[in-house]
Image: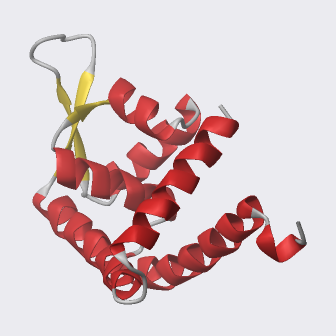
Amino acid sequence: MNGEQKVTRAVERANQRVRRYLARHLDELDITEIEAHLLARLGSRGPSTVAAVQDAFGLRGSTLTNALDRLERKGLLERQIHQADRRTYLLALTERGVAAARQVVEMVDVIETRVAGIVSADQLRAFHAVVAALEESVE
């Protein structure tokens, strides 16, 4: 198998291009890539515990805390005492955070729409199967 046919190289190459695309647009929002992921998740799923977010992203505690602190300083996120477990916090977006999350999702949706116009549903299903196999191979 030559270098161009290797799955991991192709995925990494595509990932780098997507990250460059997002970085250009995230600069306009004054947020980092990690912050964008956090905003999008909280925007789509609503308030969440720190532990659930950490599990979802697999981030080190210090990395997550730093990103949450930055979002809070920017007025995009607030930590609320979890009513069911007062020892933990719920992470919730502010109104500005919801608007920023919507912009992040719209950026990603542009890419998704472009891809959907290029590949068939069968190709997309096959791609997802390859990605699932790749993830399973590195667990």
Q: Is residue 119 above or below residue 129?
A: below
Residue 43 percent across, percent down from the top left: 20, 54
Quarter of the picture holding the C terminus: top right
Of 82 and 51, nearer the camera is: 51
Extreme residue toward the right, this view: 2
Residue 14 percent across, percent down from the top left: 62, 74
Q: Is residue 59 above or below residue 15?
A: above
Q: Is residue 34 above or below residue 62?
A: below
Along the horizontal axis of the image, is 121 left or right of 10? left
Quarter of the picture holding the N terminus: bottom right
The residue at 90%/72% (across/down) is: 2
Q: Is residue 50 above or below residue 47?
A: above
Residue 6 percent across, percent down from the top left: 79, 65
Of 69 and 32, nearer the camera is: 32
The residue at 47%/40% (across/down) is: 57
Residue 33 percent across, percent down from the top left: 49, 63
The residue at 50%/52% (across/down) is: 129
Along the horizontal axis of the image, is 47 left or right of 109? left
Of 37 and 16, nearer the camera is: 16
Q: In the rendered picture of this protein, how many numbered marks are placed on residues?
A: 0
Extreme residue toward the front, this view: 122
Q: Which quadrant of the view contains residue 17?
A: bottom right
**Colour setup of the view:** secondary structure
Along the horizontal axis of the image, is 50 left or right of 1? left
